[in-house]
Image: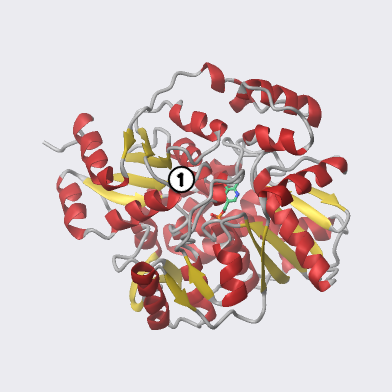
């Protein structure tokens, strides 16, 4: 499979190159030349999660070697997740797919536990001997998942940039207490969009890239702009579908709807990919929080990022520039890269663009206000299940869809984070007073949910803070040079 840029069909690269580069030199994102088709679902039924993952990775990244991909899937999912990997919880007409049982308690682990292996295999394939410097902009969850995934991986360094006041306390502590000789965490005096734009800007700055290369480094990305991160996310949608059939919740070949809490459009795009590959998906529900750029886009056709970024209780979705939407625009126009480039240019220059193609009505978009989120958490809690604020956004949008359309198709809701990552909002939503100390909140939530606090959070308050640096968005290049020099990675 070859990969080309969303902004130029003729700029095509191998899978290994697409994974190592992360983003195309013209600023576009890499997309597969075509969608491979799934084999008969019945023949996938008996596969374990790991086997299914190797199969899907093989359809896209065959050139890395099927043996390597199998190994990678094993290293990523065996022992690091529960046996079920992504457990399902069905309540009435909806099934929550819990994507948060990895080490950092958010769905980012699903892809970031396998990406390092794909990257290593790609580097070997290309014979690249430079050290790799992964730049990560995080809205809260990608950061820690990347730090875990790449921890002490030979030949790779990770720089994580997070918005100083834009992540939850648990998210912040998870990152700044991370110990590892190849990992660096920096607070950006700005919001997530500043961090993400900064990273993209550096990736397309040829002069800076050359300078870094002379120092023995190549950049790569662990954000969902990297195709190596997107493809592994397809797997859990297929797996969930198969398990729903197996449990008799849906019939063989019947369709499902999928609701996804959306920020950078990566997770919902993975579901769209699964659909293009032949998974029987009817509607994709694009759920936003108060930063409802995408809801407005699907309703009015105008993408308008010129608005204030609001800090919400679902920080991982506090995003105004939803990067992966660019991939969708490319696919629904059947590869009209000129139209896509034009729109992206307008977004850059005028902060907005108009769009007129939305596929075959397969998307439904809705947003949840803070109050909707609280009510949703409460409503689900009263039914004896606890969801985090991000998942609540998706649940609310799914409910809105069902009310609006009366569609009775079974709804799969992507449950993207553990409630323990956002104890304050969950507790206040279910009518509890929120204790002053984060750890007391965790304890109280644990009592309410009758679930143990996850081990990785229990130790958090006792860990040393390792990373205190704060930089301005326009100082990101400097932060990179300083770290390279400080660590004396410079080649003799
Ligand atoms: C990243 C994240 C999202 C948004 O996912 P995208 O792929 O960026 O759309 C939603 N919920 C949680 C908990 C996340 O960490």
Residue pointed to by mark 1: 138
In this picture, is 486 found above or below 344? above
Question: Which residue shows up at 48% across the image and 36% down it?
Answer: 148
In the rendered image, residue 346, in percent from the top left (x then y), is placed at 37, 74
Can residue 273 be seen here? The reply is no
In this picture, is 58 found above or below 428? below
In the rendered image, residue 437, in percent from the top left (x then y), is placed at 62, 21
Can residue 427 be seen here? The reply is yes
Quick one: which residue is furthest to the left in this view? Answer: 492
**Colour scheme used in the picture?**
secondary structure
In this picture, is 361 found above or below 162? below
Query: Crowdedness of circle 1 by 10 Å Cα count: few (<14), some, many (20+)?
Result: many
What is the tally of numbered marks visible in this picture? 1
Q: Quadrant of residue 430?
A: top right
Kindly state the secondary structure of the residue where label 1 is placed.
loop
In this picture, is 239 found above or below 327? above
Quick one: which residue is furthest to the top in this view? Answer: 462
Quick one: which residue is furthest to the front in this view? Answer: 308
Q: Is residue 27 left or right of residue 400?
A: left
In the rendered image, residue 373, in percent from the top left (x then y), is placed at 71, 48
Task: Report the quarter where the C terminus lies.
Answer: top left
């Amino acid at each position: 499979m070859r990969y080309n840029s969303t902004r130029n069909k003729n700029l095509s690269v191998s899978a290994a190159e697409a994974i190592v580069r992360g983003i195309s030199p013209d600023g576009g994102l890499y997309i597969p030349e075509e969608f491979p088709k799934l084999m008969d679902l019945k023949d996938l039924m008996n596969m374990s999660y790991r086997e299914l993952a190797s199969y899907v990775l093989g359809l896209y990244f065959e050139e890395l070697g099927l043996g390597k991909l199998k190994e990678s899937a094993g290293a990523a999912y065996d022992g690091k997740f529960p046996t079920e990997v992504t457990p399902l919880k069905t309540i009435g007409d909806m099934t929550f797919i819990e994507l948060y049982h990895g080490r950092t308690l958010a769905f980012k682990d699903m892809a970031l536990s396998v990406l390092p292996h794909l990257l290593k295999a790609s580097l070997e394939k290309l014979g690249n001997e430079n050290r790799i410097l992964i730049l990560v902009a995080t809205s809260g969850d990608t950061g820690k998942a990347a730090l875990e995934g790449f921890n002490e991986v030979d030949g790779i360094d990770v720089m994580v940039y997070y918005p100083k006041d834009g992540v939850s306390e648990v998210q912040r502590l998870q990152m700044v207490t991370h110990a590892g000789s190849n990992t660096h965490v920096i607070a950006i005096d700005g919001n997530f969009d500043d961090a993400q734009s900064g990273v993209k800007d550096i990736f397309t700055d040829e002069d800076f890239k050359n300078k870094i290369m002379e120092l023995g480094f190549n950049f790569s990305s662990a954000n969902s702009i990297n195709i190596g991160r997107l493809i592994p996310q397809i797997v859990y949608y297929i797996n969930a579908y198969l398990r729903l059939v197996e449990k008799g919740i849906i019939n063989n070949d019947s369709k499902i709807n999928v609701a996804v809490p959306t920020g950078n459009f990566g997770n919902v795009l993975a579901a769209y990919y699964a659909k293009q590959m032949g998974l029987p998906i009817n509607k994709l529900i694009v759920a936003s929080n108060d930063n409802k750029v995408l809801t407005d886009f699907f309703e009015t056709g105008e993408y308008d990022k010129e608005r204030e970024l609001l800090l919400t209780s679902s920080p991982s979705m506090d995003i105004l520039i939803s990067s992966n939407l660019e991939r969708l625009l490319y696919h629904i126009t059947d590869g009209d890269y000129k139209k896509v480039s034009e729109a992206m240019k307008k977004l850059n220059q005028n902060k907005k663009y108009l769009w007129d193609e939305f596929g075959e009505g397969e998307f439904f978009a809705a947003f949840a206000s803070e109050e909707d989120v609280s009510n949703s958490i409460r409503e689900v809690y009263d039914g004896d299940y606890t969801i985090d604020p991000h998942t609540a956004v998706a649940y609310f949008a799914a409910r809105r869809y069902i009310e609006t359309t009366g569609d009775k198709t079974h709804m799969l809701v992507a449950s993207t984070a553990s409630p323990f990552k956002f104890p304050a909002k969950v507790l206040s939503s279910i009518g509890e007073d929120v204790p002053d100390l984060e750890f007391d909140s965790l304890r109280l939530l644990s009592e309410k949910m009758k679930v143990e606090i996850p081990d990785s959070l229990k130790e958090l308050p006792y860990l040393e803070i390792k990373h205190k640096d704060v930089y301005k968005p326009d100082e990101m290049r400097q932060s990179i040079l300083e770290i390279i020099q400080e660590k004396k990675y410079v080649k003799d």
